[in-house]
Amino acid sequence: MATAHIRGFTLVEVLVVLVIISIVTAVGILSLASLGANPAAESAAQKLAAITDLVAQQAVMRGQQYGLRISPHAYEFLAYDGSKWSPVSDDELLRRRQLDSGLILSLQLQGTPIQLPASKPVSDDVLTDNQTADQTEIKPQILLLSSGELTPFTITVRGADNNNSYRVTGDLQHGIRYVPPDNHDAG
C-alpha cells in the first residue's frame, strides 16, 4: 500500500511571508502619509509651540508680562517694563526667530484673521521726522501674562507651495499646543 505524501507549507514559511507582506504594507502606508508633508513647517510649528509655552510659564514664574509679535516670516517675544513693550536682547530663548525661506506664518485671534506687519525686527523701527514715539510703539498681538492668562490665538505655519498647514493654538482651557494637519478639526 502506497502512502500518500502530502506536501504543504511549514509554519515558518507562512510566517516569513506574513512578515514580508507586513513590511511592504507599512512602507506603503508611511510613504502615502508623508505625501504633501512639509518637515520644515512641522518643525517650525513644534518649535514655536514649545518656546511659546515655555515663555508663558516663565511669565508666571518671574511675574513678568511677555508678548509675542508675529510677522509673515518671523516672530519675537517682547517684555513689558510698565510703560512700553520692547524686545528682550539678553535672553537667547526670547530672541527674534526668522523662519526658513518658503515658510509663512498667519495669525488668528479669537477666530478672526489678523493682518500681519512687515517682517522686520522691532529694533529696526526708527522714527521719521513726522512720527512721534506713540505712533511707532510696537505692541505684541499675543499677550502672555504673569497671571497665567493669554490671548486666545491660532498661528498657522505653512510652506508657500504646500497645502499642509501646522498650527499652534493657545487658550486658557487647553494651554499652548501644537496641532498637526490631521487634527485641525479636533483642535
Image: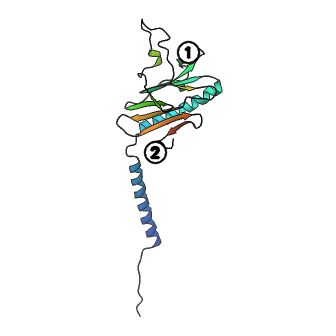
- The amino acid sitting under disc 2 is Asp
Q: Which residue is mark 1?
A: 84
Question: Residue visible at 43% across and 55% down?
Answer: 26
* Residue 59, position as x, y percentages in the image: 61, 26
Q: Residues within 10 Å of mark 1 (few under 14, many from 20)?
A: few
When asked about the image quadrant of residue 4, the answer is: bottom left
Give how far across and how far down residue 125 sits, in percent: 45, 14
Kind of element beneath mark 2: helix
Q: What residue lies at 58% left-to-right and 31% top-to-bottom?
A: 54
> Helix, strand or loop at disc 1?
loop
**Left or right of 156 on screen, residue 150:** right
Residue furthest toward the top? 129
- The answer, for residue 42, to whether it is visible in the render is no
Q: Report the quarter where the N terminus lies.
A: bottom left
Q: Is residue 151 above or below residue 16?
A: above
Mark 2 sits on what residue? 182
Q: Which mark is residue 171?
A: none
Q: Tell me the crowding category of disc 2: few under 14, some 14 to 19, or many 20 or more residues within 10 angstroms, Cα based.
A: few
Give coordinates of residue 157: x percent, y percent.
Answer: 44, 34
- Residue 174 position within the rendered picture, expressed as x and y whole percent measured from the top left: 58, 38
Left or right: residue 42 compared with residue 63: left
Disc 1/disc 2 C-alpha distance (Å)? 40 Å
Front residue of 172/86: it is 172
Q: Residue at x 38, y 30 (%)?
A: 101
Disc 1 vs disc 2: Cβ atoms closer than 8 Å? Answer: no
Q: Is residue 152 visible?
A: yes
Above or below, 139 relative to 42? above
> Callout 1, which amino acid?
Lys
Q: Say which label, 1 or 2, has the lower sequence index.
A: 1
